[in-house]
Image (spheres, rainbow, N blue to C red):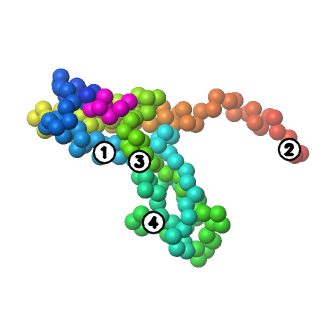
Amino acid sequence: MDKITLYQQALHTLGDREYKRDTPTGQECDLWYPTVLHEALNYGAWTFATRRRTLVPTAPGIYPLPADCLRPLKINHASFELIGRDILLNTAFHPMPDHGLELTYISSGIGMIEALPDDQPLFVRGIVLLLAARMAAKITGQPQLAIQLEQLATAALSEALHKNMLAANSNDQHPLDRILQTSILD
C-alpha cells in the first residue's frame, strides 16, 4: 500500500477528509508518518522488516550499525554492548569473529520505499489507526478519540505480530518427520 492511500484511510477514520499535501491535515500526515512507522516497526520482530548483515569493523572490536537499523535483534558474539550507533565487543574472554560480525536487525528500509507490504493487512491497519490516533486531537479536537484509536492500534499491531510470528514459525511439517527419517548411526 502506498503512503497516500494510508493517509487517506487514516483521515477517513477521523471523518470524511481527503489528503491534500499543503493543507493542515496533509501536514499532520507528513509530520506523524515517519514516527508512527518507526514505532510500529519497533513493536516486534516483523519478518518482512528483518534483515541480516555481516558487519566489518571500523576499528578492532568496533562495528557500526547499518544506517537502516532501527533495533538489533541478534548479534553473534557472547559479550558486547551498544554505545550510540556502534557495537563494541568485549574481546578479553571471547575472540573477535574471523569473518565479520553477523547482525540480525529490524530495518527502517520499508519506510524508505514509501510503500507498505500488501501481504500484511493487519500491520497496515495498525499503522492507519496509530496515525489517526496521533492526529486525532489536533484534527478533531477530541483527545478521548486519540486514546481510543491508540488502544485499537495496539490491539491491531498485537494481532498482526501474533499472526506474523505464527506464519514465520510454521513450516507445516510433522514434528517427528525429521527425527524418524534420520539414523543414529550416521
Disc assigned to residue 184: 2
Q: Secondary structure at mark 4?
A: strand
Q: Is residue 25 visible?
A: yes
What amino acid type should be assigned to the residue bearing mark 2?
Ile
Residue 117 image offset from top left, x and y in percent: 43, 33
Q: Which of these two is toward me, 184 or 136?
A: 136
Name which of mark 2 and mark 1 comes first in the sequence.
1
For the N terminus, the image quarter is top left
Disc assigned to residue 108: 3
Q: Quadrant of residue 95?
A: bottom right
Chain part drawn in magenta? 1-7
| Farthest top residue in view | 16
Q: Nearer the viewer, mark 4 or mark 2?
A: 4
Task: Report the number of discs.
Answer: 4
What amino acid type should be assigned to the residue bearing mark 4?
Asp
- Relative to 163, residue 85 above or below: below
